[in-house]
Image: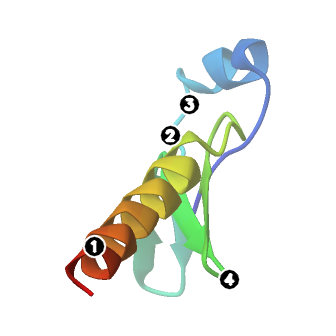
Amino acid sequence: MIWVGSKHNLAKLQQYDLTLTVGTEMIQPVNIVRNLGVWIDHKLSMKQHVITVAGGCFHQMRHLRQI
């Protein structure tokens, strides 16, 4: 689970318990999630997605250099 919002609104949430209880399971919030192959962070900046894609491209380019 991820909470998404502006910096101001996310700061307001810091004082509350942000866990979610579903049945007997407690779900803890995280800062980054992956949905349909896209990495999304709580600021919606896509920084982690860009880092991951760039790393994958660099890896493939290293393989092409060997050919």
Residue 30's place in the image compared with 60, above or below, is above
Residue neighbourhood size for the residue with mark 2, other residues' Cα within 10 Å, grouped as few (<14), some (14–19), many (≥20): few
Residue at disc 1, secondary structure: helix
Quote the CA–CA distance across marks 1 and 4: 30 Å
Residue at disc 2, secondary structure: loop
12 sits left or right of 34 in the view: right
The disc labelled 1 sits on which kind of residue? Arg
**Camera-nearest label, 1 or 3:** 1
The dot on residue 36 is 4
Q: Are marks 3 and 2 in contact (CB under 8 Å)?
A: yes
Q: Which residue is mark 1?
A: 65
Residue 43's place in the image compared with 39, above or below, is above
Tell which of 38 and 55 is nearer to you: 55
The dot on residue 1 is none
**Camera-nearest label, 1 or 4:** 1
Tell which of 12 and 49 is nearer to you: 49
Quote the CA–CA distance across marks 1 and 3: 52 Å
Q: Which residue is mark 3?
A: 16
Which x, y percent locates residue 47?
A: 56, 40
